Image (cartoon, rainbow, N blue to C red):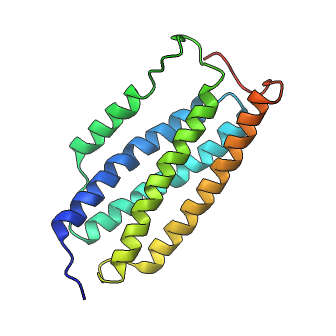
Amino acid sequence: MPTINDELLHGQLQHHWAGASAGVHFFERAADTHGDPRVAAEIGRLATEVREDRESLRNIMLSVGATPSLVASVGARAGELVSRLKPNGRIVRRSPLTDVLELEALRTAVNGKQSGWELLRAVADHDGRLDPNHLDELLRRGKSQLSRLQELHLGVALDLIAGDGSSTRTEM
């Protein structure tokens, strides 16, 4: 059985904690600002799940002796705020593409989270502190989140690009 390098495991978990913290804020903001109320409601449901996933990550961290890093969380949050700056020339109004691009970014965030769960699931086979069944459930939930985000993304993008774009809000 391999020896677990706790220092590296803790570092990995702290990086994912930072990403999870930024992700929660990003999902909540996207739910509050999305132009289509139906899509916004679904993003809101996803935000609740992402917040619960972050709490699962916190519990996993504590189970292996890692602590969530406040510094990393603040840094990731700052990065998320900077990511809002777009070179589209729109300061007050949202670009019609904003809803599409935000959904793409949310998919990327969930993909990153899935990578973390996948690694932890593999480590669980060698580390009794990790619950493989719980990690399997987190992986299933992440897969569902990705599927829902893909459906939302394609619907919003097609409506904008190939439809009349009427369900996409263009002003804040």
In this picture, residue 3 sits left or right of residue 75: left
Q: What count of labels does the image hold?
A: 0
In this picture, residue 117 sits left or right of residue 60: right
Quadrant occupied by the N terminus? bottom left
Residue drawn at point x = 43 percent, y = 68 percent: 118
Q: Whole-percent x and y of residue 158?
A: 76, 35
| Position of 30 relative to 55 (above/below) | above
**Pick the front one: 48 or 148:** 148
Q: Whole-percent x and y of residue 21?
A: 38, 45
Asked whether the viewer can see residue 66, the reply is: no
**Pick the front one: 68 or 6:** 6
Q: Outermost residue toward the bottom?
A: 1
Residue drawn at point x = 32 percent, y = 47 percent: 18
Residue drawn at point x = 83 percent, y = 29 percent: 163
Quadrant occupied by the C terminus? top right
Asked whether the viewer can see residue 168, the reply is: yes
Residue 132 figure quarter: bottom left
Q: Whole-percent x and y of residue 17?
A: 33, 52
Q: Whole-percent x and y of residue 114?
A: 47, 60
In this picture, residue 159 sits left or right of residue 64: right
